[in-house]
Image (tube, rainbow, N blue to C red):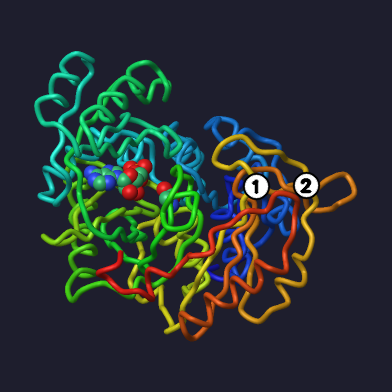
Amino acid sequence: MASEKIDILLLGAGGREHALLMKLAESPRAGKLYVAPGNGGMLQIADAAPINQENPAEVASWAAENGIGLVVIGPEAPLVVGVADAVRAEGIACFGPNKDAAQMEGSKEFAKQVMARAGVPTAAYRSFTDREACEAYVREVGGPIVVKADGLAAGKGVIVAQTTDEALAGVDECFSGAFGDAGATVVVEEMLEGPECSLLALTDGTTVVPLATSQDHKRAYDGDKGPNTGGMGVYSPVPILLDGELDTMSAIMQKVVDQLRADGINYSGCLYGGFMLTKDGPKVLEFNARFGDPETQVVLPRMKADLVETFLACDNGTLSPDMVNWGDDWAVSVVLASAGYPGSYEKGKVIHGLDEAEARAGVTVYHAGTALDKYGKTVTAGGRVLDVTAVAPTFEEARANAYAACDLIDFDGKQFRTDIGLKAILGRENL
Ligand code: AMP
Ligand code: GLY
């Protein structure tokens, strides 16, 4: 029966997964909800499944034994090791690409080759496994240039070098094992210039449904200063797009999915396109094989869709654009982080004011690095602690409301950027 409830297992523990879980829970199709490992917010509405999310056999057999009807994979690590393949092999629906398709994120070299075959614009690049050849190439081309460790490096394996010396230091870091195995192959690429824009798209391997645009803030401090982080805040939609840019980005996503299919790879799940809006048009910076974090925390609350039905349709090849609709509202999300992040930080600080913040109309606080202590109190448990998100009819209202809610929340060492979304107000020339 189409309206039957199904039990769902969601893998992951971040703000992205809390947002996914809340949207899944809204669906009339959602039965029991399980998470592995989950966080302090997720465990208030779902039960913990005692499994390692990165072990394909363990996830698949637990799902089978517990009558799970849909497994939703949040982060990249389980995708890249083939958790989706193992779940599907049990005959269980899964949201997230199989191992071969997840190489779009797992290997920059693989993604670049797909893009080349699909005729999709991206930065020119060369890839090296030999350190001396790589250094010689960097010296020949010179800075500014971008050096990337191939493979997953938790967002840290990218060195945007203004000078040749910085680039050589980056090459040294990659080959000396700073990013583990991810640095065994090094990609050196042309530096692109312009504002960045993220576009998430749902796909069943054939039909591609682009979601709303969003823009992350990757640097730790105001004014885009300081080290790169997982993302300190985000807003949606991106109001500074020029005519045709969204169509170009959407067409690029479709071309990539079509190319993969032509190559014999069915990509189903979320494809995340990271774009640079250059003066020659949008160019791809990278693809990810999953929803963005924190992009999901502003895209999902704006989306009108039955997420369970939509995810099942991605898995079984029946996705259609009319399953996803949008209103005219805006969303802004500000990350509250632990003092010291993205470097070392303390954990276990009690978080106050969550109820007061969430009592504000339009505000949702997604938990990222939180846990419940033995008294059931919510405490900090990670670098990025909370995503304080507001949805409102205007951008200014959403932004003001998100920051008002941030002021109501307190924990020892709370730090956040005060300029999230200002770029949207200042206009394109200031991005
Ligand atoms: P990634 O981890 O691949 O998302 O890269 C992190 C960040 O590095 C991106 O969000 C960009 O800001 C920057 N970046 C990556 N590749 C390039 C490039 N080819 N040109 C300029 N900036 C880049
Ligand atoms: N917000 C960047 C990412 O999810 O990779």
Mark 2 neighbour class, 10 Å CA radius: few under 14, some 14 to 19, many 20 or more: many
Q: Name the residue: 48% across, 73% down.
A: 305
Position of residue 395 measured from the top left corner of the image (x, y, whole percent): 46, 80
Position of residue 375 measured from the top left corner of the image (x, y, whole percent): 90, 49
Q: Is residue 414 above or below residue 425?
A: above
Residue occupying the far right of the picture? 375
Q: Amino acid at mark 1?
A: Ser
Would you say 244 lies left or right of 151 here?
left
Label 2 beta carbon less than 8 Å to ligand 2? no
Kindly identify which residue carries mark 1: 338
Position of residue 32 measured from the top left corner of the image (x, y, whole percent): 69, 57
Mark 1 neighbour class, 10 Å CA radius: few under 14, some 14 to 19, many 20 or more: many
**Element under disc 2:** loop
Q: Name the residue: 68% across, 68% down.
A: 407
Kindly identify which residue carries mark 2: 349
Q: Nearer the viewer, residue 429 or 154?
A: 429
In space, the residues marked 2 and 1 are separated at their CA atoms by: 9 Å
Determine contact: label 2, label 1, CB under 8 Å. yes
Q: Name the residue: 25% across, 27% down.
A: 165
Would you say 379 lies left or right of 237 here?
right
Give residue 153's quadrant in the image: top left
Q: Name the residue: 23% across, 33% down.
A: 109
Would you say 343 lies left or right of 420 here?
right
Position of residue 380 measured from the top left corner of the image (x, y, whole percent): 72, 47
Would you say 154 lies left or right of 378 here?
left
**Element under disc 1:** loop
